[in-house]
Image: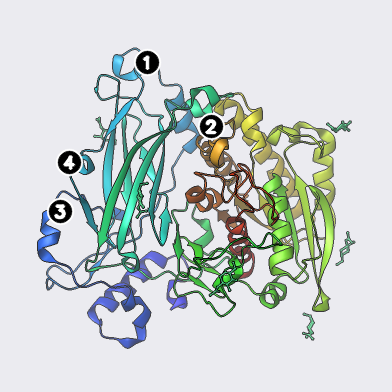
């Protein structure tokens, strides 16, 4: 199945494949795609819900046959966030938009979601994409006409968690899309939280501006329909692959097993499922239990292989991985060594190091990992972020690694939480990001001029969505999402994103409402059977472990 989707014409090929599928529905060849069909649409139920606005993004719109029998499967497409052209300038100009009229100067205290508010019971067909509009209202119930409100959206059922992507139209109206795959028919809640208003999350000290109010919690039943979604393939990370070039992901966590009696064990581990529990296709490939997630797994526009120790070493041996970012990298690297590479003996790794690690099962296999913490040029300080590159000694430290005859094979960047605390405004951050991008552009130019050094594949790993109490702080999700977009745009403008994007923000978002899977600012803290932030004993670290596997997919699935 996978080879059909290779290369630039992926979308076109995917759709021609699907059209083929529809016309040859009986073809047992495609049994697992057909598995995903639900063809038991109940006509009377469907007609009751004609209010639903169904949108298929025009770019992906397949040319449907002009007439088809009532029960024929209907081709739909996955919801997807398009790349925002001029992300930084659009954001800055909206942030600077002058007031002067009541609808601009007022503040949002309520919302209207007409198509959902009018229904007593909301029922939607699965598979399809449903678009809804939010109007921001002032305290007199009048529509506002400026954007900048930051909504957190959550669509959750017992086996599905996703963040419906939200679009700010800049005029007081916002739109979002809901979609649930046909395999996950059932009861859901849509929750819409207004976290910050009028770009106030971007302030240097936003805490006292937090609004953090649940504006809606709407039960929704997703029912069977005849919609068909393209099957996901395993993400490919090679040069020229479209999979990791997607800038903003809109994935979901799905659950495929559950042990109701599972608890964190004496070692702090969350081992709930036996090794025989495998991933059901197409949601992942490999041993589901290895994630220690009690059955949850993340997938996006493509899905991920769960690596075994053997497979990971086959790929990583002789490679040099170079990380530059915040302390979440430190956790991710340790988790990769502990959980995947068989190096449970490594208790911790420092913020700044350069080491070779050997496969405990085969001492002729080693990997070199370098990590440079970028929260401050002083490795024991914090909260300087990208500004740390203004320090000559720090630039020299980074450069020394890249001056030799061999360059890293893979580099993973992020900007990080420290920027949230340092920069006075998004405009100031944009300047800092521009400086950082120019620095790396020069470094890569030098690497190329070295001649004999192969140029590294560079990935941008977006900064996490901070969790629980940290949602209100200087590195809140509203600011981090903006910073992610700005820095990524700057790096792309300089041609630096040669590997792609790993959207950790989207991956962490469904788990950021409390501190069960994070301590506010890290999702991969070491397992420990001690009291956690939320008062319970132990915590769940699987979100970072999932990231480890996503990284391995990016590095290894060439
Ligand atoms: C806001 O902008 C969107 C997108 O341009 C447009 O579709 C919508 O009609 C506008 N809404 C209002 C209330 O002006
Ligand atoms: C929806 O939210 C309500 C209230 O918090 C909760 O009782 C219910 O279990 C939730 N339903 C689902 C499907 O998650
Ligand atoms: C469920 O998890 C517990 C540990 O918390 C374990 O002892 C038990 O064997 C697990 N059950 C199954 C069916 O895997
Ligand atoms: C790691 O191994 C490489 C050779 O593969 C060697 O050049 C380098 O010095 C080693 N680094 C460390 C820190 O041991
Ligand atoms: C150890 O690794 C080397 C290099 O990858 C490989 O050639 C060799 O077959 C491995 N040995 C075993 C016993 O797997
Ligand atoms: C780095 O920071 C630590 C702790 O803040 C401080 O003690 C140390 O002097 C600093 N080092 C340099 C070189 O400034």
Q: For the C terminus, which image quadrant? A: bottom right
**Image position of 436 (left or right of 207):** right
The residues bearing labels 2 and 4 have C-alpha atoms spaced at a distance of: 32 Å
Q: Secondary structure at mark 4?
A: loop
Query: Does 255 appear above or below 524?
Result: below
Q: Kindly report which numbered mark, 1 or 2, lies closer to the viewer in this rendering.
A: 2
Cα gap from disc 1 to disc 2, whole angstroms = 25 Å
Kind of element beneath mark 2: helix
Q: Which residue is mark 4?
A: 118
Label 3 secondary element: loop
**Outermost residue to the top:** 100
Residue 438 occupies quadrant: top right
Could you say where residue 499 lies in the image, as x and y percent from the top left?
Answer: 61, 58
> Number of callouts in the render?
4
**Sequence order check: which comes first, mark 1 or mark 2?**
1
Please tell me which residue lies in front, 520 or 149: 520
Q: Which residue is mark 1?
A: 99
Looking at the image, tell me whether mark 2 or mark 4 is earlier in sequence order: 4
Mark seen at residue 263: none
Residues at circles 1 and 2 in contact by the CB criterion of under 8 Å: no
Relative to 86, residue 552 above or below: below
Name the residue tied to disc 3: 49
Q: Quadrant of residue 144?
A: top left
Residue hosting label 2: 472
In front: label 1 or label 3:
3
- The alpha-carbon separation of the residues under discs 3 and 2 comes to 38 Å
Of labels 4 and 3, earlier in sequence is: 3
Label 1, secondary structure: give it.
loop
């Amino acid at each position: 199945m996978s080879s059909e989707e290779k290369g630039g014409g992926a979308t076109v090929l995917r759709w021609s494949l699907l059209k083929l599928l529809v016309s040859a529905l009986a073809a047992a060849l495609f049994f697992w795609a057909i598995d995903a069909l639900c063809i038991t649409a109940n006509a009377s139920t469907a007609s009751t819900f004609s209010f639903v606005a169904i949108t298929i993004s025009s770019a992906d719109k397949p040319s449907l046959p002009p007439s088809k029998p009532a029960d024929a499967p209907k081709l739909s497409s996955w919801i997807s966030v398009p790349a925002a052209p001029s992300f930084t300038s659009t954001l800055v100009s909206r942030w600077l938009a002058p007031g002067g009229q009541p609808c601009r100067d007022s503040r949002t205290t309520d919302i209207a979601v007409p198509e959902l508010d009018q229904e007593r019971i909301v029922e939607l067909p699965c598979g399809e994409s449903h678009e809804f509009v939010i109007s921001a209202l002032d305290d007199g119930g009048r529509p506002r006409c400026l954007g900048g409100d930051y909504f957190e959206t959550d669509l959750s059922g017992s086996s599905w968690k996703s963040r419906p992507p939200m679009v700010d139209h800049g005029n007081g109206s916002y739109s979002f899309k809901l979609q649930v795959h046909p395999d996950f028919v059932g009861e859901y809640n849509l929750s819409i939280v207004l976290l910050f208003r009028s770009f106030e999350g971007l302030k240097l000290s936003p805490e006292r501006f937090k609004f953090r109010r649940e504006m809606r919690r709407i039960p929704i039943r997703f029912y069977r329909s005849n919609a068909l979604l393209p099957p996901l393939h395993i993400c490919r990370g090679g040069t020229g692959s479209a999979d990791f070039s997607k800038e903003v992901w809109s994935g979901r966590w799905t659950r495929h097993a559950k042990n109701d009696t599972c608890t964190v064990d004496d070692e702090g581990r969350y081992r709930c499922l036996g090794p025989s529990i495998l991933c059901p296709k197409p949601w992942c490939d490999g041993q589901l239990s290895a994630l220690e997630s009690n059955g949850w797994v993340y997938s996006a526009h493509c899905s991920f292989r769960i690596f075994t120790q053997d497979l990971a070493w086959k790929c990583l041996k002789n490679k040099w991985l170079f990380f530059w970012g915040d302390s979440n990298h430190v956790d991710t690297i340790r988790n990769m060594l502990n959980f995947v590479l068989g190096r449970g003996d490594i208790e911790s790794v420092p913020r700044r190091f350069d080491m070779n690690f050997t496969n405990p099962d085969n001492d002729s296999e080693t990997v070199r990992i370098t990590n440079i913490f970028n929260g401050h040029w002083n490795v024991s300080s914090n909260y300087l972020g990208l500004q740390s590159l203004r320090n000559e000694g720090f630039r020299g430290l980074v450069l020394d690694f890249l001056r030799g005859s061999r360059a890293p094979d893979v580099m993973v960047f992020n900007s990080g939480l420290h920027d949230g605390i340092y920069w006075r405004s998004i405009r100031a951050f944009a300047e800092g990001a521009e400086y950082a991008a120019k620095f790396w552009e020069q470094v890569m130019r030098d690497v190329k001029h070295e001649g004999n050094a192969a140029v590294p594949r560079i990935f941008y790993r977006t900064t996490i969505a901070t969790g629980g109490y940290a949602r209100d702080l200087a590195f809140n999700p509203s600011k981090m999402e903006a910073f992610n977009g700005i820095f990524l745009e700057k790096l792309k403008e300089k041609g630096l994103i040669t590997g792609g994007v790993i959207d950790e923000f989207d991956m962490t978002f469904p788990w950021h409402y409390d501190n069960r899977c994070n301590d506010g600012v890290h999702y991969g803290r070491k397992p420990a059977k001690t009291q956690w932030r939320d008062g319970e004993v132990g915590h769940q670290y699987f979100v970072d472990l999932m990231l480890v596997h996503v990284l391995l997919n990016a590095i290894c699935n060439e």
